[in-house]
Image (cartoon, helix red, strand yellow):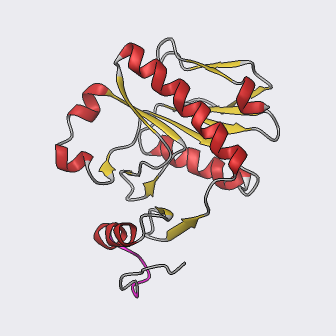
Amino acid sequence: MTVMMPDLRPLTISDEKFWELCAANPELRLERTAEGEVIFMPPAFSDTGSRNLDIGAQLWIWNQRTGLGKAFDSSAGFTLPNGAIRSPDAAWIRKERWDALTRQEQSRFAFICPDFVVELRSLSDRLADIQDKMAEYLENGAQMGWLIDPQEEQVYIYRPGHAVEVLNVPDIVSGDPILPGFILKMGDIFS
């Protein structure tokens, strides 16, 4: 496979150059740090992809039932207030915040931090890196985040102004109060 790269000689990459890189290479999974560093991410391992789908499906079903916002899968990128462009494994934004964006803003890497994010640790992920990413989401406006670690069967719950809560081998995880009534069933995610 050939990676099509626009001129990336600067040490950092602008929003426009990142957009060009992504448009030229739609098969790649990319993120950008607040400092402009491009992160090439490998495809998800098969078991991780299955778990991601399970998480996203449960979030989507809840959102369809409540109509409270917009749910996103792992391919959606968001430009955070610090300039980073991130793609959480699952995300959700309150309806009124999403609807406040123009159609054009929604069609790119929207300049918005999701209200809720999920990161699922795969075998290739360093826990410390994902923990840093979760802290970044909170610093940029996320109201809640879950870091799910299937290897250890733990869920780390992140909320602004609170210490990280760690659940060991939970059967379910509640999204209240940010996602009222949302319950993530962990059975297939931990198996």
Quarter of the picture holding the N terminus: bottom right
Q: Residue 110 vs residue 171: left or right?
A: left
- Residue 24's x, y, as percent? 37, 72
Q: Residue at x 68, y 18 (%)?
A: 172
Q: Up-down: is 182 above or below 49?
A: above
- Residue 183's x, y, as percent? 58, 17
Q: Tell me which corner region of the image, top left, top right, bottom left or bottom right, holds residue 16.
A: bottom left
* Secondary structure mostly seen in the magenta stretch: loop
Residue 36 is at least partly visible in this image: yes
Q: Up-down: is 111 above or below 186?
A: below
Quarter of the picture holding the C terminus: top right
Q: Does the magenta stretch include residue 11?
A: yes
Q: Residue at x 44, y 82 (%)?
A: 11
Q: Is residue 74 magenta?
A: no
Q: Give the range drawn in magenta.
A: 9-14
Along the line of sight, the residue nearer the viewer: 149 or 166:
149
